[in-house]
Image (spheres, grey):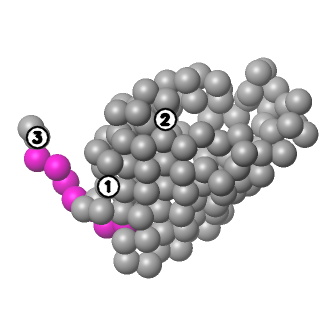
Amino acid sequence: MGERVLTGTREAVLRYLDALNAHDADAVAACVTEDFVNEHTSTLGRNVTGRAAYRAALTGFLADFADLRYEVEDLLVDGERAALAYTMRCRLRGRPLRIRGVFRFRVEAGLIAHRIDYWDSGQVTRQVG
């Protein structure tokens, strides 16, 4: 196994976001721990536990949300915790979609261990139907 470069919380979060924006499911999965928890507060969100399950879900997510792009509005870091306000833009079912939300992260040894995503699923219905 190759040598893993450990980074700080800010770097881990930005590396994760860069991988999402590159639509690289393997790179996204490489940013999270084996026991990663992906938690959604939205009724349309799907919770996933474990790197392997998360990686499997990423393929469909990245295909469904074409041209996905997260823009950082604000990033606050406190030790191994971070809060990132974002604007997400993509195309869903061929229609443009723009959602504002917040990620909360907990980072362990340079990898994302827990992500909570707060976003309004009503925006999907209003914008895409």
Left or right position of 61 against 17: right
Main secondary structure found in the magenta portion: loop
Mark 3 or 2 closer to N-term?
Answer: 3
Residue 9 part of the magenta segment:
yes
Residue 77: mark in rendering:
none
* Residue 67, quarter of the rendered image: top right
Cα distance between the residues tagged 2 and 1: 18 Å
Q: Which residues are magenta?
A: 3-10
Residue denoted by label 2: 22
Residue denoted by label 3: 2
Left or right position of 98 against 33: right
Residue denoted by label 1: 111
Q: Which residue is at 82% across, 26% downward?
A: 95
Instruction: Tell me the element at label 3.
Output: loop
Give the percent coordinates (x, y) of residue 1: 9, 38
- The answer to whether residue 78 is above or below residue 103 is below
Cα distance between the residues tagged 3 and 1: 15 Å
Q: Which residue is at 84% across, 45% downward?
A: 122
